Image (cartoon, rainbow, N blue to C red):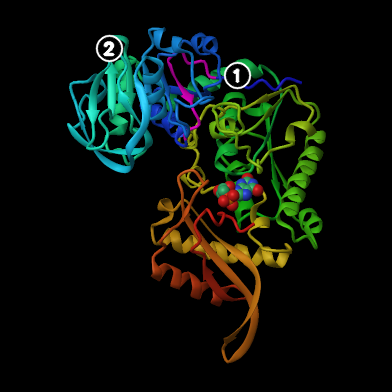
Amino acid sequence: MSVEPMHITDKERVIVIDFGGQYNQLVARRVRECNVYCEIYSYKTDIAQIKAMKPKGIILTGGPNSCYEENAPTYAKELFEMGIPVLGLCYGAQLMMLLLGGKVEKAPVREYGKTEVLLDSSSALFSNVAPTTICWMSHTDYISKVAPDFKIIAHTADCPVAAAECRDKDLYAIQFHPEVLHTQEGTKMLYNFVRNICGCAGTWKMDSFVKTSIAQIREKVGNGKVLCALSGGVDSSVAAVLMAKAIGAQLTCVFVDHGLLRKNEGDEVEEVFGVNGTYQLNFIRVNAQERFYKKLSGVTEPEQKRKIIGEEFIRVFEEEAKKIGVVDFLVQGTIYPDVVESGLGGESAVIKSHHNVGGLPDCVDFKEIIEPLRDLFKDEVRKAGLELGIPDKLVFRQPFPGPGLGIRIIGEVTAEKVQIVQDADAIYREEIAKAGVDRSIGQYFAALTNMRSVGVMGDERTYDYAVALRAVNTVDFMTAECAEVPWEVLQTVMSRIINEVQGVNRVFYDLTSKPPGTIEFE
Ligand code: XMP
């Protein structure tokens, strides 16, 4: 069984070499916003491999180390002699200087945060950038002497070398982070590098991605049979529709309703993808609610709940797949951050403990996996979704965990509790949308605490559950801050939940950021 992914073959690419910086994915995303395809590789990647990809440009990321220390991440000096433009950012800039004969040492003044930078806008890197601009600094080391043939092109009050260039060789080093939005003109600088200095034409666009992918899928699949697990989430929906556009009736999509979806969600997914919907993708809905509730009965430990839900999902899917018989391909909605975070791309060693479709490949009889979105970031997946004509409502859905409401009900999951949290959550989402703040909050939902307390309603004593409302803003879902939902909206939601949802007499608003909290309650 081969699990070779399908790959985009785009000649024009920029390579990001990752030195463990926290903004590694951001660098690649920003480059892609300039319509240039870009991939991340660890600094451990052999230079021959990088060369073989014939990149039009190379970007070295930041990183947590001091480049002059023993065993600090480094790279073959030959990188700067290949005739390919290189841009070093922060650690990458310091490493470039050190390897080429400059000097890097601990800075007398550590710079952190938004900093005024004075720059030489005659440099190609700073074309159309104001001579004084705000940039994001985050460094304890600094370049105290530039390498021979380099010219200083930017400085700050505390940092004599905020940027340097060797124009003849197209080598550029910048101490700050153009990839973060706090650097006001950062995108312009990256644009100048990839489009003007590297000479990329900017052919990476979602309409061409969709067109090329459809052609590639057709060629690869031929007359083969394809199976897809459709959850109704953004990634699997876009993957399924892309496949459907390419191979139509050869595709079968299985949607498992595990009874832990949001209110009416199963029906909404069926409406779009089912027989009365717009797509031809042989939609099969499996109503497995009771099976899941039975398995979850009496279970309170969060990780055990996750495991049970994940395993049961695989069993249900397996049974359906058996009915279909042998298939040639299995579609997965893997996206680029999954690839990078599972250690296959960059330097990040984090392995997601929760992967929606983990385990599926082992239970289905198939020859090959197709991951049509493997090279896309989330925002690109959304753009591809719009390009494919998928309704906005689906394309801009907030993330929803694979185990669903199972991890938004603290303690044991029962059908009754699922209904309570579904109803409360539906009210919350409705009011948030009504107030027009739905697109500005990263993730928001209602959860059911396992706490019951005394209240009074209509002169009667109540002893009911407490619902917790959560709303967070986040860039990467690894850190998050409580979102400021307008007070009147919270008041309305509170009173509607207590009046309309049986079994609830108290509503809390969760103020916790992540860390120390997590976004979900379990
Ligand atoms: P936490 O709770 O870890 O959530 O701060 C971070 C993001 O991951 C989602 N999440 C999950 N997604 N299976 C998933 O598919 C899970 O078990 C799971 N747990 C958390 C969460 O919704 C948030 O977007």
* Residue count near mark 1 (Cα–Cα under 10 Å), binned few <14, some 14–19, many ≥20: some
Of residues 232 and 138, the one nearer the viewer is 138
- Which image quarter: residue 321? top right
Q: Nearer the viewer, mark 2 or mark 1?
A: 2
SS state under label 1: helix
SS state under label 2: loop
Name the residue: 47% across, 32% down: 65
Of residues 359 and 160, the one nearer the viewer is 160
Q: Position of residue 273 (x, y in %)?
A: 60, 41
Of residues 245 and 40, the one nearer the viewer is 40
Image vertical order of residue 255 relative to residue 68, above or below? below
Which residue is labeled 2 in the image? 149
Label 2 and label 1: CA atoms lie apart by: 51 Å
Name the residue: 53% across, 9% down: 48
Of residues 477 and 280, the one nearer the viewer is 477
Image vertical order of residue 126 relative to residue 470, above or below? above
Q: Position of residue 112 (x, y in %)?
A: 34, 42
What's the magenta region? Answer: 8-21
**Total tally of numbered discs in the picture:** 2
Image vertical order of residue 242 relative to residue 15, above or below? below
| Disc on the earlier residue, 2 or 1 | 2
Is residue 116 magenta-colored? Answer: no
Name the residue: 28% across, 18% down: 165
> What amino acid does circle 2 point to?
Asp
Which residue is labeled 1 in the image? 218
Q: Position of residue 498 (x, y in %)?
A: 55, 76
Asked if residue 431 can be seen in this view, the reply is: yes
Quarter of the picture holding the N terminus? top right
Name the residue: 40% across, 12% down: 80
Q: Position of residue 134 (x, y in %)?
A: 25, 39
